[in-house]
Image (spheres, rainbow, N blue to C red):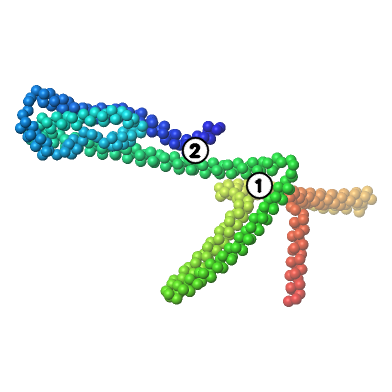
Amino acid sequence: MCCLRQFLYPSEEDLYKLIRFLVERLSELSEDRITADVKDIKDMLAFPEKVGAKLKDLKLKTEVPELSNAKAEDVYAGMPHEGDLIPQKMDKKAVDNIFCSRTGDYSKDKLASVLSRTDSTEEVMDAVRDTSGNEETSASRDDEDVGVFEQKGTFREQSSKISRYETERIQNQEKVLMEETLVKNSGLQQLEEELELLRAAAEVALDDKHPIDFYLEQLNEQVDAKKCHLVELELEWEAVRKSLEEKKKGLEESLYATNPEAQEKLQKLREVELELQSTLSEIREREEEHSKLSAELERQPKMASRGSHIQRIKEITKNSRKQDADIERILKETRELQLESNSIQERLHRTYAVVDEMVFREAKKDPVGRQAYRLLTSIHETFEQISEKTLATDRVRREMADHEKKLAAMAARSLNVDKLQADLDAIRKENEYLERRLHDN
């Protein structure tokens, strides 16, 4: 856990160690190129040594007279300085900068051994000056020296470019790493603050010695103290503000006295500020209204989608058509039954009239017929009563079914009795108020 934290939130020392490690890796990768450059420099420095050795051999073999020596001295006096022709002694600082910029830790002792060889080049140049007897050889030497100067200039330019690029890259990497460390440190500080708050809350929750009310009282005391502090700060600010306003007024008066156009500009500025404040207040009111309406919209029950409504309407129309077909069928059956009932009743009335007339005739002649006539009339009346009671029973059953359906619907709606009573009382009061107004009018 500690390693992970050190990796995520490194210190400045760890960052510098990382930068050193990266530079060492770069030096190891570029070591092959460095050895090649050192070999080129050694070859370049060994070239004048070889030339000097050959010239010494020539000097030993040939005996040059005094005149030739004098001419050689004159030629040497006419030639440019050796520092202008061949930079045999390379600048140690430039070499150090070149190799340090490319490797980062290349040893200067190795370069000193290379530079020590350049001391022998002075002797070579002395031999060249002693043995150069004509102007043609000096001109060729000048051309070679110019080439060496050009090689040195290009080499220095390349080395300076490489060193500049490496330094810029390292600086950019260092900046990026520093920014990352700052971001991570800020995040770590936030997490530590949250951890402290959670620890304090856990201590409060797990503390058995003091109840929660004790901590609440402490928090209330702290809140009261902060409120008092805020009041004091407000009083101090009021005093400071008044003094600043007085100074502002004095400065404005002096400005108006010196520059009357500033007053008009200030007046326009104040008008713009008032308009800005009014628009901002209106925007705040609109935002509050929007928030209230959005909250009300969220509280309202969510309506079904349009497709569900269309599907429901289709189902209702389908059911209504089916019900219409059933109703028409039932009506047709009731008509048929009514016609059949009417025909039966007519037949019954005709039959009863015929039987009544026949029994009445017999009743006039015979007392037994009279008794039969009485029985017939009583049976007829009894059957009429039975039919009436049957119809009444059927009517009552239908009413009972209707009432049961209404009760089921009311139970399904689960009406609140108290709410209904309150609505009824409100309606009664409204009716009484309307009646009083009518009487007054």
Contact between labelled residues 1 and 2, with CB atoms less than 8 Å apart: no
Image quadrant occupied by the C terminus: bottom right
Disc 2 versus disc 1: nearer the observer? 2
Disc 2 marks which residue? Answer: 11
Comparing 77 with 280, the one in front is: 77
Q: Quadrant of residue 195?
A: top right
In front of the other: 412 or 370 = 412
Helix, strand, or loop for circle 2?
loop
Residue 116 place in picture, x, y as percent: 26, 29
Which class describes the residues within 10 Å of circle 1: few (<14), some (14-19), or many (20+)?
few
Q: In the rendered image, which residue does mark 1 sit on? A: 326
Left or right for 39, reference 378: left
The label number, if any, that marks residue 396 in the structure image: none
Is 26 located above or below residue 181 in the figure? above
Measuring 22% from the left and 38% from the top, which residue is drawn there? 153
Q: Place residue 58 in its image quadrant.
A: top left
Mark 2 Cα-neighbour bin, 10 Å: few <14, some 14–19, many ≥20:
few
| Residue at 57% from the left image edge and 42% from the top image edge | 191
